[in-house]
Image (cartoon, helix red, strand yellow):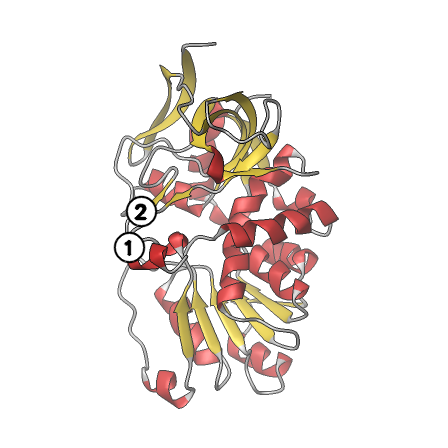
Amino acid sequence: MLTSMKAFVLVEPGRAEVREIETPRPGHGEVLLQVRRIGLCGTDLNSFRGKNPLVSYPRIPGHEIAATIAELGPGVPDQFRAGMDVTVAPYFGCGACTSCRQGRPNACRSNQTLGVQRDGALVESIAMPWQKLLPAGKLALNELVLVEPLTIGFHAVRRARVAAGDTIAVLGAGTVGLGAMAAANGRGARAIAIDMDDRKLELALKAGARAGINASKESVHDRLQELTNGDGPNVVIEAIGLPQTYRTAVEEVAFGGRVVYVGWTKEPVAYETRLFVLKELDIMGSRNATTEDFLPVIELLESGKFPMEDAVSRVVPIEGVEAALRDWDRDPGSVRKVLVEVSS
């Protein structure tokens, strides 16, 4: 067993490096994972930029994980074995707060997510409790990486109580938004994608959206009115995190509708609050995901109905992560999903 391994470390905002750190050993109830692929998301980009208030430095990022079990610690159930490919639910709840006591550990008051409040999986090996593992089933490694980010959108759709016949508008066609559109489509609802990049809108249509609106080229309000016969969508899911899109969600949703916020604005939002009351809106936050959200995502990817090849824009080695983050920072619209090949 190697005593040291490579790790990608965010040293401070705007600066990162690959370091040699000690290889962990699995304790009781833990497995040692060989990390195979890691997906980079907007959280990782904002941590690199220094715009993630939940991150302290130095920090190892990485919570979208495809891995292979390398070693079992004592007390791990027989269902897990060395050589098995898995993904990981990267959230750690306290088990004692009001959310945890309600069976909603994804919204734990003291939640720690890999790569955010605690060091993540952009390392060659990581020890994890067996309860956090989800077997790969028939999924390839690149598909496994996409499971966790897609679950965020699936969870938002479940929060919104989306049902057959609903029209759902999704603000933001990144991976979270794609998950919401695929989940809505699977429930028999009609999803409308809203973004400012035609390439992302094309991908959204392949992922399950029935229509796309480019907010930089046309009026979002006029198009939504046209597509909903003047009613507005029953549900709006905000997956961007900007003050203007927070307001758009409330302004465009139908009377009696539901708004779900996934994106997190970095500044206060000023609302026309009369719309909350006049429309009698249900306004909800959606945070992370639960194991219940992972299983339908795995089923979706196993079905082959998600446009995997189009969803990934770049694969880099661990030594190329900093350059990839810098490129993404310079041109956010050009990036769909960046994967890191940690080990072959």
The 10 Å Cα crowd at callout 1, few under 14, some 14 to 19, many 20 or more, is: some
Q: Is residue 192 visible?
A: yes
Q: Percent x, y for residue 324?
A: 48, 34
Count all numbered tags in the image, as a single digit.
Answer: 2
Characterize the local packing of mark 2: few (<14), some (14-19) or many (20 or more) Cα atoms within 10 angstroms: some
Figure check: 344 above or below 339: above
- For the question of whether residue 122 can be seen, the reply is no
Q: Which residue bears the numbered disc 1? A: 97
Going by the image, does 174 lie left or right of 243?
right
| x and y percentages locating residue 343 in the rendered image | 55, 21
The relative height of residue 37 versus residue 290 in the rendered view (above or below) is: above
Dot 2 falls on a residue whose secondary structure is: loop
Say above or below: 5 vs 48.
Answer: above
Q: Which residue is mark 2?
A: 94
Q: CA distance from mark 1 to mark 2?
A: 7 Å
- For image coordinates 39% across by 90% down, the residue present is 278
Query: Is disc 1 placed on a helix, strand or loop?
Result: loop
Residue kind at label 2, given as amino acid type: Cys
* Residue in the picture at 55% in, 37% down: 87
What residue is at 52 percent from the left and 48 percent from the top? 149
**In front here: 63 or 75?**
75
* 1 and 2 marks in contact (CB < 8 Å): yes
Q: Position of residue 161 (x, y in %)?
A: 53, 71
Name the quadrant containing residue 248.
bottom left
Q: Which quadrant is home to the C terminus? A: top right
Q: Which residue is outermost to the right?
A: 304
Name the amino acid type tagged 1.
Answer: Cys
Relative horizontal placement of residue 219, taking residue 138 as reference (left or right): left
